[in-house]
Image: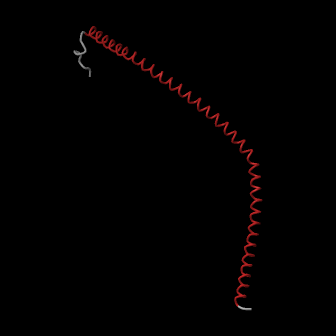
């Protein structure tokens, strides 16, 4: 045997060992993927079992949110009505104040005039002539 034949046989055996190593690695990968498939199948089965209660819970949440929306709409209408009433009361208060204020001033002026007249009648002096008391 000469060196080129030995090198050819060595290269062939090396390629065979590399191929055998790849084969063993692929077998290990196949086992890993088979276990992973079983695990994912189990996860899918468990998720399918949980799906129905989740859908039911979401249905309840949707009902609750619809009720909350209706309640908020009612509250909005009630607040609008209260604002309208407050505006009406404010207008009424302004009208009453505008109607009563001149009357109060007139009553005050009338009482002032009456007291000045009575003082002049009783004492004979006007408010300007009165001496301050100490």
Q: Nearer the viewer, residue 23 or 72?
A: 23
Total marks in image = 0
Residue 27, x across and y down, in percent: 76, 69
Where is residue 65, by image quadrant? top right
Q: Nearer the viewer, residue 52 or 95?
A: 52
Where is residue 100, by image quadrant? top left
Asked if residue 66 lies left or right of residue 116, the reply is right
Image height check: is 27 above or below 120?
A: below
Residue 69, x across and y down, in percent: 61, 34
Image height check: is 132 above or below 39?
A: above
Residue 75, x across and y down, in percent: 58, 30
Instruction: Give the residue at x 37% y 15%.
Output: 104
Q: Nearer the viewer, residue 3 or 18?
A: 3
Quadrant where the N terminus is found in the figure:
bottom right
Instruction: Give the residue at x 59% y 32%.
Output: 72
Looking at this rendering, what residue extends furthest in the top direction? 121
Looking at this rendering, what residue extends furthest in the left direction? 129
Image height check: is 64 above or below 128?
A: below
Quadrant where the C terminus is found in the figure:
top left
Instruction: Give the residue at x 23% y 18%.
Output: 131
Q: Nearer the viewer, residue 20 or 4?
A: 4
Asked if residue 109 lies left or right of residue 8, the reply is left
Image height check: is 48 above or below 28?
A: above
Where is residue 53, by image quadrant? top right
């Amino acid at each position: 045997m000469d060196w080129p034949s030995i090198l050819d046989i060595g290269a062939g055996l090396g390629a065979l060992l590399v191929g055998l190593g790849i084969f063993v690695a692929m077998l290990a990968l196949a086992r890993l993927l088979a276990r992973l498939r079983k695990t994912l199948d189990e996860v899918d089965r468990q998720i399918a079992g949980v799906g129905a209660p989740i859908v039911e819970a979401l249905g309840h949440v949707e009902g609750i949110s619809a009720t909350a929306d209706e309640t908020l709409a009612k509250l909005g209408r009630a607040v609008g009505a209260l604002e309208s009433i407050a505006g009406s009361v404010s207008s009424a208060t302004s009208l009453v104040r505008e109607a009563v204020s001149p009357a109060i001033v007139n009553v005050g002026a009338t009482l002032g005039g009456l007291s000045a007249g009575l003082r002049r009648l009783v004492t004979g002096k006007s408010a300007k002539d009165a001496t301050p008391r100490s």
